[in-house]
Image (tube, rainbow, N blue to C red):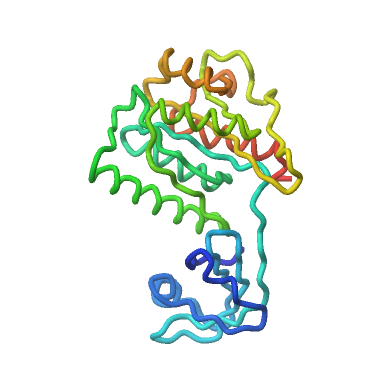
Amino acid sequence: MSAPVFLAEPGSLSGVRAGDAYLLDGAEGRHAGVVQRRAPGERVDVVDGAGVRLVGVVEDVSSAGVHLRVDDVVVEPAPAVALVLVQALAKGDRDELAIEAATEVGADGVLPWQADRSIVVWRGERAAKSRARWLGTVRTAAKQSRRARVPDVGTAVDSRALARRVGDVVAAGGAALVLHEEASEPIADVVLPVPADGDGTCECLVVVGPEGGIGDAELALLVDAGARAVRLGPHVLRTSTAGPVALALLAQRLGRWS
């Protein structure tokens, strides 16, 4: 069984080296030592959410936290093509189900989209609380799936702001794919972006509409900005399912699962 993962703050592990002692404290330390009752000799990983992973072994558990011996430090590079799920806000927590599964299959970022047909609306205090829930969801999903990188969660955008983001991504050499049941181009046939600079990165946006679908004017706005309408297959999937399935297919094509 793979080792459990606990989260540290981004950048906080940069000075840790193999052979060092490390104290996992705070809420994560309490969860490891009190809730999960991790014992001496067990392996645990500590990640900073930005690609650094400590491979540790529990040496002691105290009121201060879990004391680890660091056996190795692994730095997992950012992918050349970042997969970003643009998820329309949806009722019944279907949007949260989508970003949870998307994180598990490898999304590098998620962007809340206030689509024209979204029943759920993020405004004011609700917007802040809802985004905080999304942040918690991707953190938990990243830990469950043993990831060293936690996806970024953007602030909610409307369709015009999304079109501007699409234009910027495409202009920078990336791609934007809008999942649409009436599209003729299969997602399997789309030419995926390749960073122009061998050491650079680019984005591939995967846009998923709400329960009522993406309106014609909305689709035209995104396509005019440089997006491509694509279909997954012969079946119409729920808004909570479409994004993770598309990301899994793209991750396979990008060689992440080989």
Residue 68 location (% of width, % of height): 55, 81
Residue in the image at 63% along x and 40% along y: 202
Q: Would you identify the image quadrant in which residue 172 lies?
A: top right
Q: Is residue 25 left or right of residue 177?
A: left
Residue 213 drawn at (x, y percent)? 41, 20
In this rendering, the answer to whether 7 lies above or below 102 is below
Front-lying residue, 114 or 169: 169
**97 shown above or below 74:** above
In the figure, residue 249 lies in which quadrant? top right
Describe residue 169's horizontal placement relative to residue 92 as left or right. Answer: right
Image x and y of residue 225, in percent: 53, 22
Location of residue 198 (image quadrant): top right
Relative image position of residue 14 (x, y in whole percent): 59, 71
Query: Residue at horizontal 73%, vertical 38%?
Result: 196
Q: How many tags in the picture?
A: 0
50 or 137: which is nearer to us?
Answer: 50
Image quadrant containing the N terminus? bottom right
Where's the C terminus, which quadrant? top right
- Does residue 97 appear left or right of residue 22 in this picture? left
Camera-side residue of 39 and 159: 159
Residue 181, relative to residue 145: is it above or below? above
Residue shown at the point (58%, 37%) measured from the top left: 247
Residue at the far left in the pictured view: 125
Residue lying at 68% horizontally and 33% vertically, measured from the top left: 193
